[in-house]
Image (cartoon, rainbow, N blue to C red):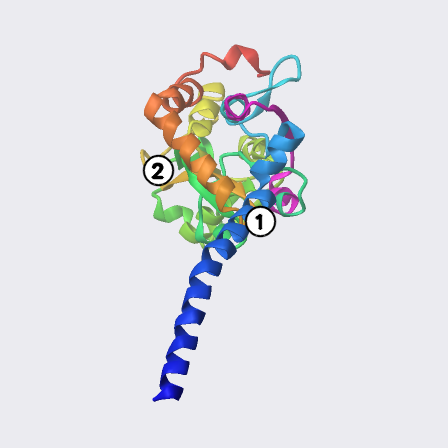
């Protein structure tokens, strides 16, 4: 009986000690996560560095060579609300995730679609934008073709390397040829030149290209492929940053600011005279 009481006393003592220690351990772990968060780094340095890749109307150069576009509005407002400066880091699309992981910037805000494959490498915020992909074709080369006709070895697509449209093309038209380029503009130029039959891109770029080249280009199908949301991309293991970005995005949706900015850049061309033809 004495041994039993001693064991019981020891067990109670251990439990009490654990009860005291666990909150302290949890607090210490929480403090460590906070100090390691990119949010802390941004606040300490007084600047948020945003990686982006140039494509209309997300981010582009105006007539003076300055960056403008939906992403620039989002990044500047985010920095203002954080009370810090903003630095934009233009980066080639196929290297933008490795550059994030290497610490070349704090977050990607560049219309990056949220996909499971990317999510294995990086974390995504909630969507701050929604978009769909349309097919843009050389009218003379594709006149009378059905959607199924594009899935042929005789058909050539062009697309930006590493972007979602390239994946959609491969999945939707696996028999077709696919030429890859570093910029959307190069892919569109292949279609204009007649080197490729078609490309795919997020709206409103296809509609804008048709307006610029109505005698050559067309959007032959009134449908959007792979509609999905775009999120901020950040390095994994940073719950504080993910929490802050999600809350900021939610607030901007509730206030109507994100919708207003999205409509300006994607549903109008009020900005078109600010950029080169």
Q: Is residue 63 above or below residue 174?
A: above
Q: Is residue 259 left or right of residue 160?
A: left
Q: Disc 2 or disc 1, which is closer to the eye?
A: 1
Pick the residue in front: 26 or 21. Answer: 21
Furthest residue to the front? 2
**Residue neighbourhood size for the residue with mark 2, other residues' Cα within 10 Å, grouped as few (<14), some (14–19), many (≥20):** some
Q: Residue at x 38, y 41 (%)?
A: 228
Determine which quarter of the picture holds residue 277: top right
Residue at the spot of label 1: 32
Which of the labelled discs sits on residue 121, or is there none?
A: none
Q: Is residue 63 above or below residue 230?
A: above
Verify whether residue 86 appears in magenta.
yes
Are the two marked residues, 2 and 1, in contact with CB atoms closer than 8 angstroms?
no
State whether the magenta stretch is mostly helix, strand or loop.
helix
Alpha carbons under labels 2 and 1: distance apart: 45 Å
Pick the residue in front: 83 or 124. Answer: 83
Q: Is residue 51 above or below residue 22?
A: above
SS at circle 1: helix
Where residue 146 sits in the image (x, y, percent)? 34, 43
Pick the residue in front: 213 or 113. Answer: 113
Residue at the spot of label 2: 224
Disc nearer the start of the sequence (2/1): 1
**Residue neighbourhood size for the residue with mark 1, other residues' Cα within 10 Å, grouped as few (<14), some (14–19), many (≥20):** few
* Residue interval drawn in magenta: 75-99
Where residue 17 sits in the image (x, y, percent)? 46, 65
Pick the residue in front: 220 or 118. Answer: 118
Q: Is residue 34 above or below residue 5?
A: above
Determine which quarter of the picture holds residue 160: top right
Camera sees residue 215: no
Q: Residue at x 51, y 49 (%)?
A: 30
Camera sees residue 21: yes
């Amino acid at each position: 009986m004495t041994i039993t009481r001693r064991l019981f006393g020891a067990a109670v003592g251990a439990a009490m000690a654990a009860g005291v220690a666990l909150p302290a351990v949890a607090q210490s772990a929480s403090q460590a996560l906070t100090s390691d968060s990119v949010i802390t780094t941004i606040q300490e340095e007084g600047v948020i560095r945003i990686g982006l890749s140039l494509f209309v109307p997300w981010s582009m150069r105006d007539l003076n060579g300055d960056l403008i576009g939906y992403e620039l509005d989002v990044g500047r407002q985010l920095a203002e609300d954080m009370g810090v400066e903003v630095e934009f880091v233009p980066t080639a699309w196929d290297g933008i995730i490795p550059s994030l992981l290497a610490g070349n910037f704090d977050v990607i805000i560049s219309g990056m679609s949220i996909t499971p494959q990317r999510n294995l490498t990086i974390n995504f915020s909630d969507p701050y934008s929604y978009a769909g992909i349309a097919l843009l074709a050389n009218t003379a080369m594709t006149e009378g073709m059905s959607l199924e006709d594009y899935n042929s070895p005789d058909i050539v697509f062009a697309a930006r390397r590493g972007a979602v449209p390239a994946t959609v093309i491969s999945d939707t038209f696996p028999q077709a040829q696919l030429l890859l380029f570093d910029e959307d503009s190069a892919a569109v130029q292949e279609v204009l030149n007649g080197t490729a039959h078609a490309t795919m891109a997020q709206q409103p770029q296809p509609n804008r290209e048709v307006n610029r080249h109505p005698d050559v280009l067309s959007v032959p199908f009134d449908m959007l492929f792979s509609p999905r949301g775009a999120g901020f991309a950040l390095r994994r293991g940073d719950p504080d940053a993910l929490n802050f970005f999600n809350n900021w995005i939610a607030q901007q949706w509730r206030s109507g600011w994100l919708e207003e900015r999205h409509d300006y850049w994607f549903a109008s061309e009020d900005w078109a005279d600010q950029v080169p033809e």
